[in-house]
Image: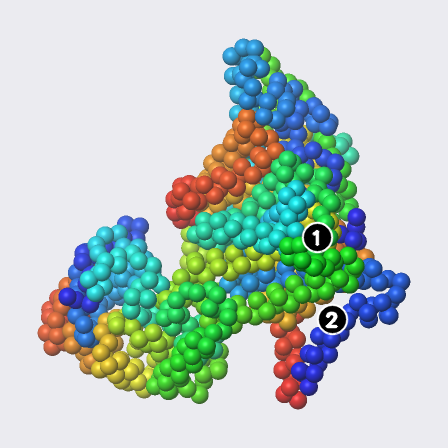
Amino acid sequence: MRRAAGWALAVVVVSAPWLVAVAVPRQQRYVLHVLIFTALFAALALSYDLVVGHVGSLSLAHPAFFGIGAYAAAILATRAGWPFLADVLGAVLVAAVVAAVVGVPLFRLTEHAFAVGTLGLALVAWIVANNWVEVTRGPLCVTGIPKPVLGVGSGPALTVTTLPGYYWLALSALAAVVLLYRRLTTFRLGRAFHAVRDNEPLAGAAGINPLKYRLLAFTIAGALAGGVGALYVHYLSVMCPEEMTIGLTVNLLVIVFLGGVGSLRGVLLGAVLFTALPEALRLAPTWRLVIYGLLLLLVVVRSPEGLESLLRRAGARRAAV
Amino acid sequence: MGASKWPPNPQTLGTAPARPSRSSVTGCATQGPRNGCPQTPKRSERPGEAVALLGYATGAELIFDLLEQVLHGLTLGAMYAMVAAGLALMLGVARLINFAHGEFFMLGAYAFWYAYSELGLPYALAALVAPAVMVLFGVVYQRTVIRAILPRSWHVQLIATLATSIVLTNLAIIVLGTQPKEVPTALSSRILDVGGFRVAWQRIVVLVAALVMFWGLQRFVGRTRIGRAMRAMSQNREACAVVGVDVQRVTLVTFGLSAALAAVAAALVSPLFNIFPDMGTALTLKAFAAVVAGGFGYVNGAIAASFLIGITEALAGTYVSYAYKDAIAFVIMIVVLLWRPQGLFGRRIGI
Amino acid sequence: MALLEIRELTKRFLGVTAVDRVDLAIERGELVSLIGPNGSGKTTLFNCVTGYLDADGGRVLFDGRDVTNAPPHRMARLGIGRTFQQVSVFPRLSVLDNLLVFVQQHQEEDLLARLVRTRRQQHFEAEAVARARGLLELVGLADRAATAAGALSYGQRKLLAFAAALMPDPELLLLDEPAAAVNPTMINQMKAHILAAHRQGKTVLLVEHNMDVVMDISRRIIVLDGGRKIAEGPPDVIRRDPRVVEAYFGR
């Protein structure tokens, strides 16, 4: 029964562009736009959950890696003329290297200092993006980022120009991230991450080096965030410093904590809810943040495990009946 | 722009387009009279200009400029210190991480502006209205949010107070608008001229007032009964409850005190800088950097680190690079932590 | 050469010397108890040896190798297993997973291998599961294999922690108060388990307050008081040593 539902859902998700064209023909562009954002944001949220939910480090630096990847891709594409696949790869690598390099000193700090340090990193990244005008053009933004071209060398290539095309590209990226997420959070690696999260001293007694595993999760998460950033700029064809502000952290926190920290379904659910809903309601950004803030406050204080645990409990009750 | 932009867009450090250095509270500090910044006229205006020492006609000019920057740094440091001291107090006494602390400053600044510019109250009175309002606000905040999160893990505290900060900041944007407010007072434009060395009177007021406040804080914490209770709580909470210390009351007083400190800092400093809704965030971060560098929960350490940050920021801002000076606080924090992970003054117990 | 050798180990806390130039040596195959009144420094010693505290002076040698101040995970990989005074498990992991975590160290770091489920990986995983189930049978927790460790009773968690420490097949077992805060039946169980592990060739050093257990199973006893070693010898000798009596009961 559940497997059938799962397949049905997959079919719906993949054929969304057609469904949308039939259901709301006049709003097609807008709805597809929201779907693309949702897919990208879900991938970003999953990468964030790796650090916060599975290894238990409250990092507030994710906007930095998103931004670093985004700018790296943007600059490689516009200034150095790199092809799409290459600049995405470049973005992923740059973000990974930065994450690994700053991660080493950061993880030697106590938990509180770590949080403040990551917040500082996000701030510094924004300052650099806004002021290193020779490279990032600061508030003027990097523009003219070309459309994604899927192809290698001078062989046959597919240029993604239509919204459905972008959607499937984003969806593929999300699928890849989901697979990686699952692989990282189960079996030996997953057990090691969870051990470090739940009882660091005991993890040490079990032969697990907490620093190594935290750094690993942090670096992979940073790399993924950079990759999402790269896809993002190829979609929007523009990259500005405002994309990497602390507001992004708040959005991610909302998605992860309200959706269900450490849970694949929860985070996906949270991403869909908290990306699509505000768009549907056409909330002004300031009002959206006020509401998000209040929601976050409420949920974190009352029920820290988020919606997913509520769902699980509801499901359990249903099964018992 | 609006709906087509990625959701996580606005909020601090990025909303308003046209302001030059609006990411920092010190927007006007080294800019000079442009953009309506009420300020002491500066000799070398442009960022990085001072590198061209050749531009100085006499050695005296160079010295004066340096002294001005140091004084400016002290003013900044005093402001950071008052904010950081409150933060350290809450951390030390109540083990509370309050990411909305900067909003005490922001709201206090607006309260002061309202009292002084809109209601027309005299400066001294308006400067007292700000902390009074903020203490009230602090009590409400304590009763609602803080009391619920105090017994919880610091993750919860951090996220909850970060959320509060976002809510307050954006409400301020909605209600008060993003245009910065100026509060020029009599003393902010009156210049003291000592043989070529010029400084706005207001800066001297800030420094003196800050020193007075720190002295008062020391006496309060050192001599009064509540102060003793605060120190006791910071050293051993469980024992306090057993011995009969009213933990709730002491926490409330500490909270009010930290709010008041931030608000007074706002009232003192508002005549010198612009007031805008997201000034709180950058300030919170720098205050945290100071608290962490000074030794988590050690008030004097936070104060010392704040002055270090202030002076370095001012000097680096003028002589090295203006654009990146906001990053200074974190660079200092990271350097300190790498060198001495327990903070500048080592592991200490209590405030 | 002794398996574990501690030379002049010293640890100070803010003016209090918790461990004061302690010397001790444990030979392979021994079963030694470390006793002493509360606050005599036993657990601090354990923590220094296993890397949770940095010693202020002295040396720790394991199998001839200097491992002073090595981090806990390194000590674990060298073959030292331990339990904690406040029983420590991974509450959100299942009982089985709690044990599986302890064999991380036997498979070395190949990120790619971990991402791709190679045949070798699956084989290793199966072996680990088999071994874990065997240990669970041993301690009587086999039927709770899928339960979250946090849901177990205190005594069950102690058994789980013991089994987990055995999982990587360590040479040296450091047990911190295995008989504390459990009922007499459980105490007998623990005694049996410790003796069984010892018979299999493990070297055991335990910290314990329960004198019956100590006198019953130990071959040698070391006594600490106020951070210093005050006596050492077989149970009969220690039982009668006036210094030991004085340390416990005062003058």
Residue pictured at 31% horizontal, 70% vertical: C82
Q: Is residue B302 visible?
A: no
Residue C35 is left or right of residue B279, and the answer is left
How did the renderer colour the structure? rainbow
Q: Which residue is outermost to the front? A: A155
Q: Chain of mark 1?
A: A
Separation of residues labelled 1 and 2 (CA atoms)? 21 Å
Q: Quadrant of residue C43?
A: bottom left
Type of amino acid at the residue the image marks with label 2: Val
In the shown orientation, is residue A294 left or right of residue C197?
A: right
Q: How many marks?
A: 2
Tell me, for residue A14, which label it has, or none: 2
How packed is label 2: few (under 14 Cα within 10 Å), some, or many (20 or more)? Answer: some
Observer-nearest of A234 and A205: A234
Q: Pinpoint the chain carrying mark 2.
A: A
Q: Nearer the viewer, residue C124 or B209?
A: C124
Residue A27 at x, y percent in the picture: 86, 62
Write down the residue under mark 1: A234
- Give above or below for B190 relative to A138: above
Closest to the observer, A37 or B18: A37
Q: Residue at x 52, y 41 (%)?
A: B330
Q: Residue A21: image x %, image y %?
A: 85, 67
Q: Amino acid at mark 1?
A: His
Q: Residue at x 89, y 62 (%)?
A: A26
Which of the image's four quarters has the N terminus of chain A?
bottom right
The mark that comes first in sequence, 1 or 2, is 2
Instruction: Judge by depth and name the residue closer to the eye, C142 or B219.
Output: C142
Write down the quadrant of residue A179 in the picture: bottom right
Q: Position of residue A20 (x, y in %)?
A: 83, 68
Q: Residue at x 84, y 63 (%)?
A: A28
